[in-house]
Amino acid sequence: MKQVLVTGANGQLGKSIKRISPNFKGLKFVFTDVADLDITNSEEVNTFFESNALDYCINCAAYTEVDKAEEEAEKVYSINATAVKNLAEACQKTGAVLIHISTDFVFDGTKRTPYTEEDMPNPLSVYGKSKLKGEEHVQESCDRHFIVRTSWLYSEYGNNFVKKMLRLAETRKQISVVNDQIGSPTYAGDLAEFILKVISSESTAYGLYHYSNLGAISWYDFAVEIFRQHQKNVHVVPIPTRAYPTLANRPAFSVMDLSRVKIIFGSTIPLWKHRAI
């Protein structure tokens, strides 16, 4: 039986993995969050890996508050880069396979066709730069790894755009949402299923992959569909990004090409609108 460590287990993806983990009978899971394992502490990480016979490590831990990150760069890099280096080095020492979750925010959004794994990253924010640094640490320190970039993650858990919109709908009849940032929503349950299927298949097709649900939309489009599915009578007003200034710059277009993940893993990826939101 393969033993799988899941860091950041209290986040959206970690909880989604935990929910479906009983379906994967050949895998034994160890779920940790910062209270159980401080991945920014290299000694603690090394001791943990030496004490547990781990076959895989899924790193779901991340600092994801994009705007707040602009004011807490040291903390952001500690979690999104240094901690990733610690995990990568521990995996390399013990022979575990590292599956690291990254983001579409490594791109600057100037492209107008979906980003491939070969496109040059150029992050616009502290968050994006720290996540790119984490990717580089994985590539430099761990031979057996999968880096999975995803985008616009949402789920039943934690803080996300879907839950924010539904919360606002309780007190507002009109909401303004930007319509000139284009990307692809990703249901965390689909991403969790993909990751565990990769592990179960014992694939050695290591490297960098893009995974999101299918479809290119704006945040405005997403909000409209959220309210439609939940039968909320809310008028959504499309506005440009310049009308909603934020601390962090965001890519105007971050749709990712999914060809590689489909070809190599034979993945069937649902259209975002076909998922219950």
Image: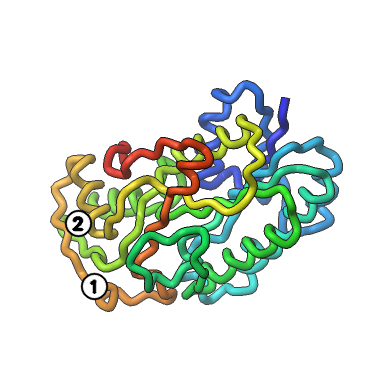
Residue 231 is left or right of residue 265, and the answer is left
Q: Nearer the viewer, residue 95 or 27?
A: 95
State if disc 2 and disc 1 touch (CB < 8 Å). Answer: no
Quarter of the figure with residue 257: bottom left
Q: Name the residue located 42 percent from the left edge and 48 percent from the top edge.
A: 212
User: Which is closer to the viewer, label 1 or label 2?
Assistant: 1
Query: Looking at the image, which residue sits at the far top?
Result: 25
Residue at horizontal 71%, vertical 29%? 2
Q: Which residue is mark 2?
A: 172
Q: Nearer the viewer, residue 91 or 40?
A: 91
User: Residue 30's spot in the image, x, y percent?
Assistant: 69, 35
Residue 14 relative to residue 4: left or right: left
Q: Secondary structure at mark 1?
A: loop
Instruction: From the image, tell me which residue sits under label 1.
Output: 240
Q: Position of residue 13 (x, y in %)?
A: 52, 44
Considering the numbered disc 2 on the image, is that residue within a helix, a strand or a loop?
A: loop
Identify the image quadrant of residue 189. Answer: top left
- Residue 255 visible? The answer is yes
Locate residue 28, reporting x and y percent. 68, 28
Identify which amino acid the numbered label 2 is placed on.
Answer: Arg
Left or right for 125, reference 152? right
In the picture as drawn, the residue positioned furthest to the front comes out as: 263
Query: Which residue occupies the foreground of this view, 160 or 104?
Result: 104
- Residue at 39% x, 63% y: name it: 254
Identity of the residue drawn at 28% across and 38% down? 274
Q: Is residue 171 above or below residue 25?
A: below
Can residue 167 be seen in the rendering of this structure? no
Q: How many marks?
A: 2
Task: Judge the density around disc 2: few (<14), some (14-19), many (≥20) Cα neighbours within 10 Å.
Answer: few
Q: Earlier in the sequence, mark 1 or mark 2?
A: 2
Give the CA distance from mark 1 to mark 2: 20 Å
Near mark 1 (Cα within 10 A), the count class, few <14, some 14-19 or many ≥20, is: few
